[in-house]
Image (spheres, rainbow, N blue to C red):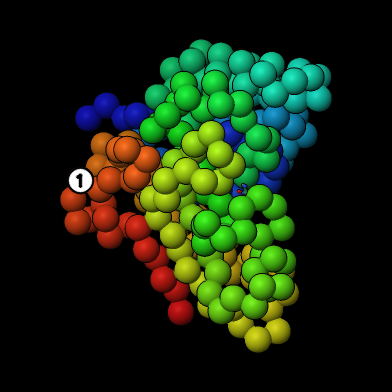
Amino acid sequence: MSRKRVGILISGRGSNMASLVEAARAETCAYEIACVISNRPDAKGLQVAESAGIAAVALDHTALGTREALDAAVHEALLAHNAELVACAGFMRIMTSDFIAKWDGRMINVHPSLLPLFKGVNTHERALQAGVRVHGCSVHFISAELDAGAIIAQGVVKIMPGDDADTLAARVLPVEHRIYPAVLNALAEGRIRLEDGRAVFSDDAAAGLSLLATG
Ligand code: GAR
């Protein structure tokens, strides 16, 4: 079976990237990592990728100047590494609709909230402020509107008395690390697809990935 080549986009620490890399080590994994691209040359995740022997590409958004220039450079790097799918993993740049259209149905993101709640940043603080009792993460297809693409899977955690943004983030992150590689694998197997703006699952096992509830 030929594995789908995945380009990963990061901006920082890269723990989600590392979980995708780790899962790709399994013989049964349906994807392989084509490259890791960061808009920040100092992103810790780039070093992690490099030391795992993965092509690591720094595209400094401040030097490139515009969103269009960054997106064009990212697109070129993805093509240069023969990427077929794109996984955003803590990539903190808003992308142009032209770039997004080029990867429609082939580009996914992990976001640290139960979308459509708490799009954007500071999701854990905002969940606590809102007083919701459950929180979590979502994996979704990327569409032109920020954090509004078709939801594929969600991981749910309880909010505990005394939680602050850090304790909550620390409870959500391991769920991201479980859910994201599983979804990417199913996407690479062709068992999840984007159809009329919705995520469609081709079988029960793929559909079963859509919810991960933790105690
Ligand atoms: C993760 O929690 C991810 O969900 C979030 O940034 C963190 C990156 O951590 N992404 C977003 O907020 C995207 N809107 P990581 O670099 O350790 O994977």
Left/right placement of residue 182 relative to residue 57 reads left
The residue closer to the viewer here, 48 or 147, is: 147
> Does residue 159 appear left or right of residue 43 in this picture?
left
For disc 1, the marked residue is 202
The percent coordinates of residue 178 (x first, y second) are 44, 57
Q: Residue at point 47% right, 43% down?
A: 149
Q: Is any part of residue 187 visible from this angle?
A: no
**Is residue 97 shown to the viewer in this render?**
yes
Image x and y of residue 10, in percent: 63, 37
Between 86 and 150, the one nearer to me in the picture: 150
Residue visible at 46% across and 50% down in the picture: 139
| Callout 1: SS | loop
Q: Is 121 placed above or below 167 here? A: above
In the image, farthest residue toward the bottom: 161
Label 1 neighbourhood size at 10 Å, few (<14), some (14-19), many (20+)? few
Q: Which residue is drawn at the image coordinates 49% and 38% (left, top)?
A: 142
Left or right: where 166 falls relative to 86: right
Q: Residue type at mark 1? A: Ser
Seen from the viewer's position, the closer of residues 88 and 131 is 131
Instruction: Pick the quarter of the image with the N terminus.
Output: top left
Q: Position of residue 124 (x, y in %)?
A: 67, 65
Residue at image x 20%, y 46%? 202
Residue at the far left: name it.
203
- Placement of 49 over or under 103, stated as above or below: below
Q: Position of residue 52 (x, y in %)?
A: 55, 36
